[in-house]
Image: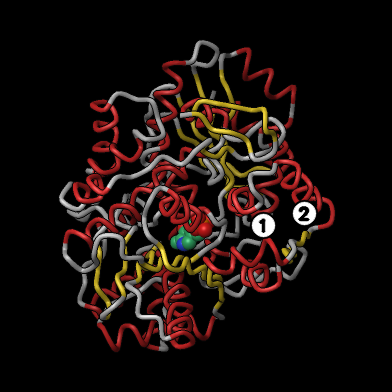
Amino acid sequence: MRLISTRNSNYYIDALDAVLKGISDEGGLFVPQEFPHLTDKMLDDFGHSAYAETAAKVLSMFFDIPAGKLLKMAHNAYDGFSSEDTVPLVQLSENEYVIELFHGPTLAFKDMALQMLPQLMSEALSRSEKVNNVMILTATSGDTGKAALEGFKDVLGTKIVVFYPQDGVSDMQKLQMLTQEGSNVLVCAVKGNFDDAQTGVKKLFADADFNKVLADKGVYASSANSINFGRLAPQIVYYIYSYSVLLANGRIKKGEPVNICVPTGNFGNILAAYYAMRMGIPVNKLICASNRNNVLTDFFDSGMYISRREFFKTISPSMDILISSNLERLLFEFLGRNTIKINDIMKNLSEQGAYSLDEKVMEPIRNLFFADYCDELRTKSTIRDIFEKHGYVMDTHTAVAQAVYERYVAGTGDATVTLLASTASPYKFAADVYNSITGEKCENAFDAAQKLSELADMPIPKSITDLREKPILHDLVLNKDELDKAVFKLI
Ligand SMILES: *Cc1c(COP(=O)(O)O)cnc(C)c1O
């Protein structure tokens, strides 16, 4: 299918080419020219199918890849998940179902997309006459880096360098990356914080000399971050799949709307829920949950997006974001797909750190979205309460969504069946989760995982226990203005 750019109404690109390209030349994001439509028959079938089959069917509505090949790619992506259902649906209370999206190799929902994206890139590469090798450059604050490394390791025609802030990721996240195996991967610490790493990578992309050196070797620099359409499309699948499973179980009737509640950072995951709705999943409310970095809550309340504000480091670090890039795709739809208006507001955002929309635009957005946030204390008490009430352990990100959902229900009395996206295994943030439940401190991540396992009587995921034994394979540390050295080392 063809995609268009949010900032240029004359730009068309095939979905598979867009995966290679990442973002449009003028900075716009790629979006479907039209949303494909799910039939009732499809929704019936998906509820009785394996996840990989559903993924192949849904992705075939976007990508022009033969059905058999796409199915093989989906099996490749999801067969290694530790849960037989790939994305188990856990009923927490009468109306609430948790979609567990963290059973992939790196224990965060990023795997749902990053196990698929490299295969889409490979396919695009094999069809491209100009490009035969891709160099993925990614700055990470923790989860994306490891998920991208696992996804791209040993994928033909690709190499990947991940840059992480030397002191800006959790011990478990750092260890996950430094033990990364694969002949085409490199992990590099950057002296500084996440912004330094991110700025360094952005400079590389914009550096003509650097890109020429790569081009002379037939290599094309690309990125694996969440504005790539190849990350968005696989995320639509689990909302459609979960709805179909509820239908098949008789929990909802045909056409019955659900709420979808998502712990949000870059707005990619909740945008995928919106896209699922546009494809035909009946939705009552999309509930956008933020942590103390509540720029989105303020935006939905006031119509003003103000990114120039204090930044807080929280116990849900993957949501510590002040510029939610994927919001641009939502606004594109609610502004009547007007590229001129999008250019205007994005210019205001980059030059003034803010933009505002009038009431006429905000009203329909507010009819669909409920947005709220939750502070650290509330996140912790939610983890404890849910464990005490249901014996269920939530990670620090999912708990933010749970707290916001509870506040939504308290305020509205809404009894609509609700899907809550669970984005990480509690073991990935074991120290904070253990502390939330017991009040006790346990700084060593492995010890915390062990204690959490005993407390909740649930096994530690193998990828965590394995980490203890794995040798450190990466030790490169660079200043933010010399990141090209890492790339040249890998070429
Ligand atoms: C990335 C991430 C999020 C935020 O998802 P977005 O798509 O950026 O909104 C939430 N929770 C976890 C655990 C994550 O890794």
Among the 4 quarters of the image, the one containing residue 150:
top left
- Helix, strand or loop status at disc 1: loop
Residue in front for this viewpoint, 291 or 452 = 291
Q: Which mark is residue 368?
A: none
Looking at the image, the residue that sits furthest to the right is: 352
Q: Residue at x 50, y 34 (%)?
A: 160
Q: Nearer the viewer, residue 412 or 213?
A: 412
Q: Residue at x 53, y 16 (%)?
A: 131
x and y, in percent, of residue 304 in the image: 74, 66
Q: Image quadrant of residue 212? A: top right
Asked if the residue at label 1 sits under 8 Å from ligand 1, the reply is: no
Secondary structure state at the residue bearing disc 2? helix
Left or right: residue 127 versus residue 200 is: left
Question: Circles 1 and 2: CB distance less than 8 Å?
Answer: yes
| Residue density around tag 1, few if under 14, some if 14–19, many if 20 or more, within 10 Å | some
- Front-lying residue, 323 or 408: 408
Say which mark, if any, is on residue 323.
Answer: 1
Q: Nearer the viewer, mark 1 or mark 2?
A: 2
User: Quarter holding the C terminus?
Assistant: top right
Q: Is residue 479 left or right of residue 267?
A: right
| Amino acid type assigned to the residue bearing label 2 in the image | Leu
Judge left or right: residue 490 versus residue 208.
Answer: left
Q: State the CA–CA distance, disc 1 to disc 2.
A: 9 Å
Cβ at disc 2 under 8 Å from ligand 1:
no
Q: Is residue 34 left or right of residue 281?
A: right
Residue at 75% x, 68% y: name it: 309
Residue 349's label in the rendered image is 2
Q: Position of residue 449 (x, y in %)?
A: 33, 70
Judge whether residue 368 can be spotted in this image: yes
Residue 113 % position (x, y):
40, 45
| Kind of residue indicated by mark 1 | Ile
Mark closest to the chain's N terminus, 1 or 2:
1
